[in-house]
Image: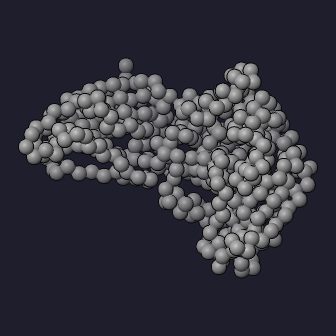
Amino acid sequence: MKKFLLILFVVIAPFCGSAIGLSCNSSCLYAGEKDSLIYKVRQNDDWVFYGKNSPEIEISVKNPDSEESVNNKVTFLVSTDKGKKLYEFSQGVSLSPMDSTVISFGFDVPSPGFYKILLKHDGKLIKKFNIGFEPEKIISPPDPKPDFREFWDKARTELASVDPQYKVKKLRKKCGSLKNVYLVTMRSLGGVEISGYYVVPKNKGVYPVVVSYMGYGAKPWCPDPDTDGGRIWFVLSVRGQGLNQPGNIYGDWITYGLGSRETYYYRGAYMDLIRAIDFVCTRKEADKNNIFVEGGSQGGAFTFAACALDHRIAAGAPSIPFLSDFRDYFSIVPWPGNNVLKKCKEIGMSDEKLYDVLSYFDIKNLAGWIKCPIIMASGLQDGTCPPHINFAAYNQVVTHKMYYIFPNCGHSVPVLWYNLRDNFFKKYTK
């Protein structure tokens, strides 16, 4: 059995503490009923641990009552991100009026990965949160089929045979002081029409381009035409989503055409990403040597896929990426696995057939093809695209790469991320 340590010591100084690190918010405080203690989980090491040091969680405890002593029992539980229980330990806490203490739970974990922590006092929830241990050492081997490259080469050949029929329409009401805004429509794989907002500085010149890929079912958005006069932005709506959603024929997208790799929704959607790069490369104002891509969630997966399939890209910035390591993904969080497995049952598709099909679209299988630098953002508390699946893809990238884990973020990133991303793009501007 793994070693479990509990260290209990009393803090003489006044109760204090704060969450630190790259965070979206920092709500670590729990205050119970009048006769309860006040707990605060300290964010040591941003809750991501490295090296030989075992994870250690510190809980500051204070008795706020000025007259009565209080007794509580703290229970500490550790499980894998798939829910397998590793440890459970309980410790009594007794504090005099206005007294404080710190409980430090140290423990070993069996392997690199992400783990769930649950804290209770007298059976009531204090806090639940995730921690990480050596995320770059997570082993989630790629599982591409022998014809994986042939499959994508064929898709690209088919895309090249489609006349893009680019149309660019100026949207005068959306134009701003620094940039003009255009609606772009074009034809992608299968002759499907896709679209996007193309936002260009008014001053004549040649500019770096950022192609932004949108999240799953995200509402259409247009970059602010009154800021950032030094770059072109192209926000793509893939088939059936965003600007194209009014004519959506794909249902909930992720289950469309699931019975076959040839008909599956993401075969066409991944080609839409490349068609967007094709469009940018036709524009005289676009610097073809400085095309960057970015996106969050589904857009994060699209960023990985685009960088793998199109080597005209100078650098990519995926955040909280989707569509990775499907077997583990579906065992960690309920969505989208529940929808996909339900669809499989409806069409009589076996699990093995399902994962065979999904392996062609798994970004961890594509990530090894990437030739440009990558910066990735991950939300440690993400219950939609958990950090495990983010790193399943990231760990296959062999080019220069870096990542940020935001310890208090769920399926989101803080404003800080956008500055980090932009500085990364500037670093790799040729």
Q: Residue 320's spot in the image, x, y percent?
A: 57, 46
Q: Residue 284's spot in the image, x, y percent?
A: 81, 71
Vertical order, 214 against 351 (above or below): below
- Residue at (26%, 43%) from the top-left corner? 31
Asked whether, in this view, residue 164 is left or right of residue 80, the answer is right
> 389 or 61: which is nearer to us?
61
Q: Residue 352's spot in the image, x, y percent?
A: 70, 22
| Type of colouring | one colour
> 265 or 245: which is nearer to us?
245
- Residue at (23%, 43%) from the top-left corner? 38
Asked whether, in this view, residue 424 is left or right of residue 179, the answer is left
Q: Residue 121's spot in the image, x, y percent?
A: 26, 33
Vertical order, 210 against 262 (above or below): below
- Residue at (73%, 40%) from the top-left corner? 251
Quadrant of residue 115 in the image?
A: top left
- Residue at (64%, 51%) from the top-left corner? 218
Asked whether, in this view, residue 188 is left or right of residue 411, the answer is right
Q: Residue furthest left?
A: 67
